[in-house]
Amino acid sequence: MPRTLKARPETRRPASRHVLMASAAALAVWLASGVPVVADQARTPYVKARDPLAAGRYLVLIGGCNDCHTPGYAERGGRLPMSRWLTGNPVGFRGPWGTTYPSNLRLTVQTLSERQWVEMAHTRNGYPPMPWRALDRMSEPDLRAIYRFIRSLGPAGVAAPARLAPGVEPRTAYIPFVPQAGGLVRANAGDKAR
Ligand code: HEC
């Protein structure tokens, strides 16, 4: 291809047509290679409900989003009014990646368009323990339903603290997220030795 371009520098049109054809060919190869693309995910199944808000609420519930993103949700067995849902958590998760805080999603959706939300879910490789891999596999209609549901709740609360680098001592409460040597670990080690 570059040789063709060099041989006929004066003919601009055929050259750009070549470039177009090459791009199309490259895209076809890429699609055939089985690399997951957003278009594929859009065709995967999605939740159907009487309206997008009901679908979004259902997905948030079964996706366990409240367990981390809603303060006190897990402790109260989920008995918290929707007005408190997804307002971010000031209790951090501390591990080798530093300390991360479940974001205030009620504020996040105010700063992103629906399209940007879908793109972030499909491309962002963020920090644990956020299940980024699960979000990445969600179909586009499901992600849109979640976005619409969270938007419908309106903005509330304050931003969660920013991530701390590894080794920085948090000034907030935090949950140590590293394996501890306990009875079960020892029992498993014993099983292996037998
Ligand atoms: C085990 C805890 C946990 C669960 C469950 C969880 N998250 Fe998160 N989430 C986090 C943490 C911690 C962060 C910050 C991670 C980072 O900075 O990469 C985060 C960040 C995010 C962000 C980025 C927001 C921003 O403003 O940058 C989005 C979007 C998000 N979560 C959506 C969801 C959704 C939707 C669900 C449910 C399907 C969910 N999360 C479930 C812990 C969790």
Image (cartoon, rainbow, N blue to C red):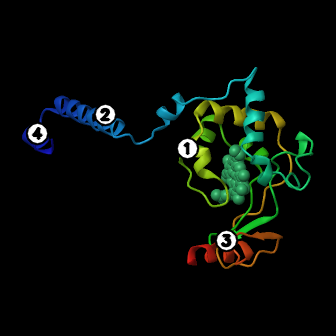
Who is closer to the viewer here, 124 or 20?
A: 124
Say what amino acid the circle numbered 1 marks.
Answer: His
Residue 56's spot in the image, x, y percent?
Answer: 74, 33
Q: Earlier in the sequence, mark 3 or mark 4?
A: 4
Q: Quadrant of residue 9?
A: top left
- The residue positioned 74% from the left and 56% from the top of the image is 102
Q: Does 105 sit left or right of 27 as displayed?
A: right
Residue at which label 4 appears: 4
Label 2 C-beta lies within 8 Å of the nearest ligand 1 atom: no
Who is closer to the viewer here, 192 or 53?
A: 192
Q: Earlier in the sequence, mark 4 or mark 2?
A: 4
- The residue positioned 79% from the left and 44% from the top of the image is 106
Q: Does 151 sit left or right of 116 as displayed?
A: right
Helix, strand or loop at mark 1: helix
- The residue positioned 84% from the left and 54% from the top of the image is 158
Who is closer to the viewer here, 54 or 105?
A: 54
Label 2: how many Cα within 10 Å (few below 14, some 14–19, many 20+): few
Residue at which label 1 appears: 122
**What is the C-alpha distance between the residues marked 4 and 2?**
22 Å
Residue at which label 2 appears: 28
**What is the C-alpha distance between the residues marked 2 and 1?**
21 Å
Residue at which label 3 appears: 95
